[in-house]
Image (cartoon, helix red, strand yellow):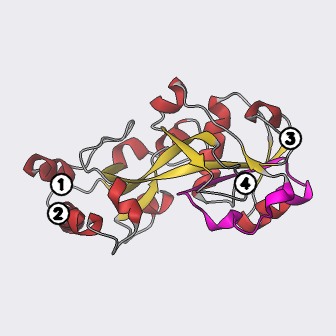
Amino acid sequence: IVDIVDVIGIDLTIVQSDIMEAMRIGVLDVPDYRDNIQYIAKLHKEEIHILSSADIRNIKQLQGKNVSFGAIGSGTSATAPVIFNALDIEVEDKNMSNTEAVAGVRDGTLAAAVFVVGKSADYFTDIPKDDGLHLLPIEINKDFQSAGYLSSEFIDDDYPNLIPKGKVIPTIAVSAVLAVYNWSENSARYNRAAIVTERLFENLSRLQRGNTYHKKWKEVNLDTEVPGWDRSTPAQKQLRKL
């Protein structure tokens, strides 16, 4: 999101929808982001995973404890502060890679670790079933909804080594968003972004057909609005054609 504003040659980026909230509360400092950043379409969902040690049974128990917020610059590092700010929970946040974070929860260095990724994620497949680690439930609330989060859940088929058979764990999800710089209309950069927008709208049905492409494409609905964001002019024009 910084690159799309500051780096010459970057027109589009895929980011999480809560990046606007992260900038609003000061997690990221991006000048004039409201004027410069728009979106073409909401893409797939990415679930919020909070992997926890056995003694932590709810998210409130993380108050004051060590929690990984992901590697610096990752999507998780922007999302985790938004979530804990909304829940008014203060933790000792650590910036670790996904591999380091899983190891930290397993060895007790961390009470929990946050991961933002579409389920089912490979990070957890090597955790033995009897390790006692589990995923914490997160209930949707008004603050989460206003920031653009969606309700979701984990079931045992998603993570059989972490979730007992038949159990459902509620969580929230953030949307991946195809973002675009707000170029002046009919400039060369605007026209290039408009071509990408047109191709996406024309060909989405091909990406959603059968099992050739990733199943997450089936979650994409080009009509869906993203709270807190402005839709780009080329995308608005394509929507009128649907």
SS class, disc 3: loop
SS class, disc 1: helix
Extreme top residue here? 142
Residue 50 place in picture, x, y as percent: 69, 47
Tell me the residue at 46%/56% (across/down): 15
Q: Is residue 138 above or below residue 235?
A: above
- Between label 4 and label 1, give the one nearer the viewer: 4
Q: Quadrant of residue 169?
A: top right
Residues drawn in magenta: 105-131
- Looking at the rendered structure, the kind of residue marked 4 is Leu
Residue 165 place in picture, x, y as percent: 67, 49
Verify whether residue 114 appears in magenta: yes
Q: Is residue 96 above or below residue 151?
A: below
- Looking at the rendered structure, the kind of residue marked 2 is Glu
Extreme left residue here? 241
Q: Is residue 193 above or below residue 132?
A: below
Q: Residues within 10 Å of mark 2 (few under 14, many from 20)?
A: some
Q: Which residue is mark 2?
A: 198
Tell me the distance, in whole angstroms, between the alpha carbons under discs 2 and 3: 48 Å
Q: Which residue is mark 1?
A: 234
Tell me the distance, in whole angstroms, between the alpha carbons under discs 1 and 3: 46 Å
Q: Which mark is residue 136?
A: none
Q: Which residue is mark 3?
A: 65
Tell me the residue at 62%/30% (across/down): 86
State yes or no: discs 2 and 1 in contact (Cβ < 8 Å).
yes
